[in-house]
Amino acid sequence: MENITPEIYDKHVISQGLQFQVDTYYEPKEISQQRRIKIVLKAINPQQGEKILDVGCGVGTFAFYSAKSKALSFGIDYSKASLETARVLCDRYGVSENTNFIVANVFRLPFKDASFDKVVAADFIEHITLEEKERLLDQIEQMLKPEGRCVIFTPNLIREKLGEIYWGIRQVLLGDKVPLNKLHLGLINRFHFEALLKKHKFNFEFSYQDITRPYLARLPIIRHFLALNLLWIIKKA
């Protein structure tokens, strides 16, 4: 799997343009993106005066929405272009006073212990290795206040693997091009990740979600295989 460097990701963000980020994240046009933001934001439940950290924030989606709720939000990412976009858009939408965006290594966060009421990592852990997931959980444990919580939202490994099989069959039978996502190098299933949470002695609540077909997340048994997204709300034991 190709390593996606900050330089490669910067070029990707720049090529998309500012309006794409507005239409996708800040004023999402697609229903699936609207659902994604609603699901994650409900789990975060940002409150006025809270300090919230958006890990792997990209163009600052949840730092932005948290700031709209009068929280003091921080966004961390390795992409300078993404964070510059976040600064420009948060200024445009009038929340720049409540947002801070920092280019940093998420495995060595530049904050004091117990700095944050809440941490969110939305569509991030699928981009990192298993060893990096462990390091991230170490950082989350250090960053959270005693009563704090972290929201983790990620694609469902089983669903994506079934999708690969489906598109592989279509390619053979119909000659369709197989959509590839080189960024998803660290997909993980529910039970494997929960083993990591237990190892770190986190308490957690789990739910299946699906931003494209919500009913799939409500079907017993089937949701384990077909729900698109996994959501955890984790707390210190």
Image (cartoon, rainbow, N blue to C red):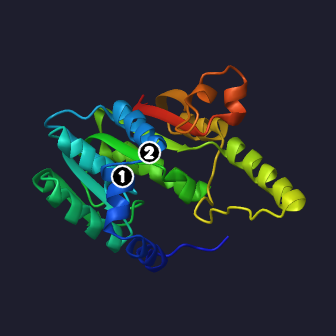
Q: Are marks 2 and 1 in contact (CB under 8 Å)?
A: yes
Q: CA distance from mark 2 to mark 1?
A: 7 Å
Q: Label 2 sits on what residue type? A: Gln
Q: Which residue is mark 1?
A: 25
Q: Which residue is mark 2?
A: 33
Residue drawn where x is 22% and y is 60% of the image: 89
On screen, residue 229 versus residue 38, left or right, reads: right
On screen, residue 219 versus residue 47, left or right, reads: right
Dividing the image into 4 quarters, which one contains the C terminus?
A: top left
Q: Label 1 sits on what residue type? A: Tyr
Q: Is residue 223 above or below residue 80?
A: above
- Horizontal and vertical percent position of residue 16: 42, 70
Which of the two labelled residues, at mark 2 and mark 1, occupies the earlier sequence position?
1
Residue farthest to the top, as pictured? 220
Q: Nearer the viewer, residue 143 or 21?
A: 21
Q: Is residue 130 above or below residue 198?
A: below
Q: Secondary structure at mark 2?
A: helix
User: Would you identify the image quadrant in which residue 21 lies?
Assistant: bottom left
The answer to whether residue 103 is seen in the rendering is no
